Image (spheres, helix red, strand yellow):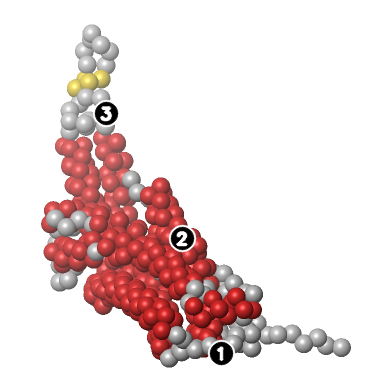
């Protein structure tokens, strides 16, 4: 006998989510508590994202922008390749530095987003609970509750709720409550605008990398390839090896000529051999040849180091940009999801306003309270969870400071 099992949705399967579930599902995704979510916890950015972006910022700010410093950094003053000259590299470094200087504002906005979410959750719960509490104190509701022996309208079923129409006092209270709903709606619109502003900052920061800096690095990488820099590096490395051998040969040759100029016992007649020792012509020629080779080797090594440093710097920048771009795309998606949360909530409050404005009796009022609670109650989970997400950012920043900041 087979037992029927309910299929669990996978990460690839699309789930049907009701409007009142959107915020709960969103928080489940950003906290990694939702089934099928592999991304590390983080409202906008994960702990790993923050650390890696801050490392990019640190490295970007450390790049030299003064002409002399750039030359020392890349190890050459003239490349002979248009686009790879020190002035070209300097211009690129300056643009990278400008980009990294903008991160602090983005980071603070991301942190503020978590704080705003926490504050909003508290506010909508307080305002929502107050609204329901005031409804339960409306004259017609108090009469109904007293009659059936209940304390809250939302605890009654539709059949338990007699249909009683508003009197003038009820209508006055209802009109005041519309103001509360309007206030909640304005608060949501403000939060949506703030989220959009944060997303715009993240997008602008990312696009500056992906549309300007990354293509520039790619062009320099292509220049390196088209100008056979790899072959030049190989040739220079081989020349260093050859010079090392030549220097060793000259050292051995010189050692053959090294001997005492004076021979014999001290205090007696001695032999004087000038030309055959270290004072001689052969030794001097070997010495000068060795020195020339050493000087040449230093020049070649400097050239080699510069080309290697340039290639490595370009490769590292390309890799770093690719990594940061992916992380910021994730951040944009998270913020886009949060925008959808606000849009959904805004639609729910709009519907609540419309519904509330049409109510004139206790049964429809009870239905409103029941529906409105499904809008408010999910935010009780947000209130505590968003605090944990803020803590993740704090932990990431502290981990970076302890491990990398000097």
Kindly tell me whether residue 391 is visible in this rendering: yes
Q: Position of residue 383 (x, y in %)?
A: 48, 65
Label 2 neighbourhood size at 10 Å, few (<14), some (14-19), many (20+)? some
Estimate how packed mark 1 is, as few (under 14), some (14 to 19) or many (20 or more) residues with alpha carbons within 10 Å.
some
Determine whether 48 is above or below 346 in the image. Answer: above
**In the rendered image, which quarter is residue 112 located in?**
bottom left
The residue located at (37%, 66%) in the rendering is 116
Residue for badge 2: 387
Residue drawn at x 23%, y 49% is 298
Residue topped by disc 3: 259
Are the two marked residues, 3 and 1, in contact with CB atoms closer than 8 angstroms? no
Residue 221 visible in the current orientation = no
The residue drawn where x is 21% and y is 37% is 283
- Mark 3 and mark 1: span between their CA atoms? 124 Å
Q: Nearer the viewer, residue 385 or 122?
A: 122
Residue that appears at 26% across and 35% down: 257
Q: Nearer the viewer, mark 2 or mark 3?
A: 2
Q: Nearer the viewer, mark 3 or mark 1?
A: 1
Q: Which residue is mark 1?
A: 163
Along the line of sight, which residue is nearer the eye, 12 or 236? 12
């Amino acid at each position: 006998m087979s037992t029927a099992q309910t299929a669990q949705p996978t990460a690839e399967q699309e789930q049907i989510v009701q409007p009142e579930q959107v915020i709960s599902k969103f928080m489940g995704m950003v906290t990694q508590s939702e089934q099928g979510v592999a991304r590390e916890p983080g409202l906008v950015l994960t702990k790993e994202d923050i650390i890696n972006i801050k490392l990019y910022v640190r490295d970007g700010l450390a790049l030299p922008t003064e002409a002399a410093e750039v030359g020392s950094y890349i190890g050459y003053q003239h490349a002979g390749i248009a686009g790879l000259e020190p002035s070209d590299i300097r211009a690129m470094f300056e643009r990278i530095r400008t980009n990294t200087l903008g991160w602090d504002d983005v980071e603070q906005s991301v942190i503020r987003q978590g704080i705003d979410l926490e504050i909003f959750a508290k506010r909508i719960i307080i305002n929502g609970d107050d609204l329901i509490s005031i409804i339960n104190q409306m004259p017609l509701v108090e009469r109904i509750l007293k009659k059936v022996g209940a304390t809250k309208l939302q605890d009654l079923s539709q059949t338990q709720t007699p249909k009683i129409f508003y009197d003038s006092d009820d209508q006055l209270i209802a009109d005041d409550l519309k103001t509360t709903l309007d206030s909640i709606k304005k608060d949501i619109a403000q939060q949506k605008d703030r989220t959009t502003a944060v997303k715009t900052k993240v997008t602008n920061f990312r696009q500056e990398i992906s549309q300007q800096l990354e293509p520039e690095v790619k062009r320099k990488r292509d220049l390196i390839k088209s100008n056979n820099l790899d072959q030049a590096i190989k040739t220079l490395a081989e020349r260093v090896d050859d010079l090392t051998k030549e220097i060793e040969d000259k050292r051995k040759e010189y050692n053959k000529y090294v001997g005492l100029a004076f021979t014999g016992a001290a205090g007696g007649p001695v032999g004087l051999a000038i030309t055959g020792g270290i004072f001689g012509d052969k030794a001097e020629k070997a010495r000068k040849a060795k020195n020339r080779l050493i000087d040449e080797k230093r020049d070649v090594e400097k050239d080699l180091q510069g080309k290697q440093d340039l290639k490595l710097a370009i490769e590292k920048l390309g890799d770093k940009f690719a990594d940061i771009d992916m992380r910021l795309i994730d951040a944009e998606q998270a913020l886009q999801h949060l925008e959808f949360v606000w849009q959904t909530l805004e639609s729910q409050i709009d519907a609540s306003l419309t519904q509330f404005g049409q109510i004139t009796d206790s049964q429809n009022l009870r239905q409103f309270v029941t529906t409105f609670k499904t809008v408010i109650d999910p935010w009780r989970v947000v209130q505590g969870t968003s605090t944990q997400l803020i803590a993740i950012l704090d932990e990431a920043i502290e981990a970076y400071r302890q491990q990398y900041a000097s």
